[in-house]
Amino acid sequence: MRSFQRVAASIAFSALMAAGATCARAEDAPLGVRLVDQMNALYGAHPGVRANHAKGAVFEGMFTPAQGADALSSAAFLKGAPTPLTIRFSNSGGVPTALDSNAVSGADSAAIQVDAGQVEMSGNNIQNNARYGLYIPFGTGFDHLVEGNAFKNNALFAILTASDSVDATSNWWGVDGQAPGVGGADAVSGRTGDPTPLASVPSVPALGPRVLLTAAAPAAASGATAVTRPPQRAQRTMEQRHAAGRAGLERFAAARAGRYRWYVGAIERQTRPAQ
C-alpha cells in the first residue's frame, strides 16, 4: 500500500512539474508568438492565412502628388514624378471569410450559407430571399459575428443556425427598433445570443434594380428576333459620387468599430475568472 502511495505521489508531482514547465514555456515565448496564438484562439487557426487582417485585396497604381505638396514635406514621393505603389486594403481580425458591404436579394434558398469555417458579416443588405438570410446548417466548431447588417422579408428566418453560436447584436431586422420576430421583423432561430435591434436601417448598399425580361416579337422583314436591351444606367453626378464615397467610408468605419467591440468582448470573456 505504501509503495502504491509513493508511486501515486510521484506521478502527481511529475504532472504538476510538467504543467508548470508548460506555463513557463508559454510565458517565455516571444511576444510575436504569443500574439499569434491569441489571435488563433479568438478567430481559429486558418492554415495559409495570416493571423490578423486575414481578408484583404492588393492593388497596384501610381501616386501623383498634388501641386505644391513638396512645400509641406521633404518626402521624396511628394517631389515631381509619379511614384508606383502597391496597396493592400484589409479588414481587421483573423477571419478570411469576412463578408461586408454586399447586397443580396432574391435567392431561391439562402442569401448566405456557411458549411465550414468561420464567418463575420457587417454592413450587408440581406432582403427578400426565399428562405433564409444567413443559413448555417452544420456545426463548424466556430463562433460567428453578425453585426451592423440589414435583414428584411427573408421568408423563414433572417438567421438559422443549427448548433453554432452567432453573435447577432446590433442588426436591423426589418422594422425600426423591433427585436427579431416581433411586429413584423424577421425572425431568427438557434444560438444567436442577444439580438439587440438597431433603431434604424444601418448604412448598407442599396439593392440592385430588378431586371424584367419580356418576349420580343419577331421582326417582319427578315424573320430575325428583335432584342430589347435594358436601359443604360444614368451617369452619376459628382455630388452623387461623393455621397456614395462618404457612405462607403461610413460602412467601413462602422464595420471596424463593430469588430473592435467584439474583439474586446472576446478578450474579456477569455480573461474573466471562472465563477
Image (spheres, rainbow, N blue to C red):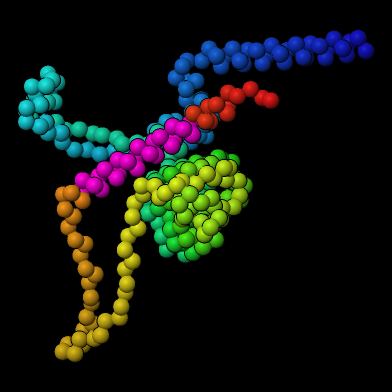
Secondary structure mainly formed by the magenta segment: helix
Residue at point 83% right, 14% down? 8
- Give the quadrant of residue 87: top left
The structure residue drawn at horizontal position 72% and vertical position 15%, both measured from the top left corner, is: 15
Q: Is residue 239 left or right of residue 109?
A: left
Judge whether 234 appears above or below 84 on screen: below
Residue at the far bottom in the pictured view: 220
Residue plotted at (63% across, 12% down)? 21
Front residue of 20 and 157: 157
The answer to if 225 sits in the magenta stretch is no
Q: Is residue 82 visible?
A: no
Total numbered circles: 0
Pick out the residue farthest to the right. 1
The boundaries of the magenta stretch are 241-263
Across and down, in percent, residue 45 comes to: 51, 33
**Residue 259: where, in percent of width, then height?**
44, 35
On the image, the x and y values in percent for residue 141 come to 59, 41
Is residue 178 placed above or below 1 in the rendered structure?
below
Q: Quadrant of the N terminus?
A: top right
Establish if 104 lies above or below 57.
below
Q: Nearer the viewer, residue 257 or 218?
A: 257
Task: Tell me the quadrant of the picture where the C terminus can be found.
Answer: top right
The answer to if 246 sits in the magenta stretch is yes
Q: Does residue 126 appear in the picture of this structure?
A: yes
Front residue of 100/197: it is 197
Q: Which one is in front, 258 or 93? A: 258
Q: Is residue 5 above or below residue 53?
A: above
Q: Residue drawn 79% across and 11% down?
A: 10
- Which x, y percent locates residue 13? 75, 11
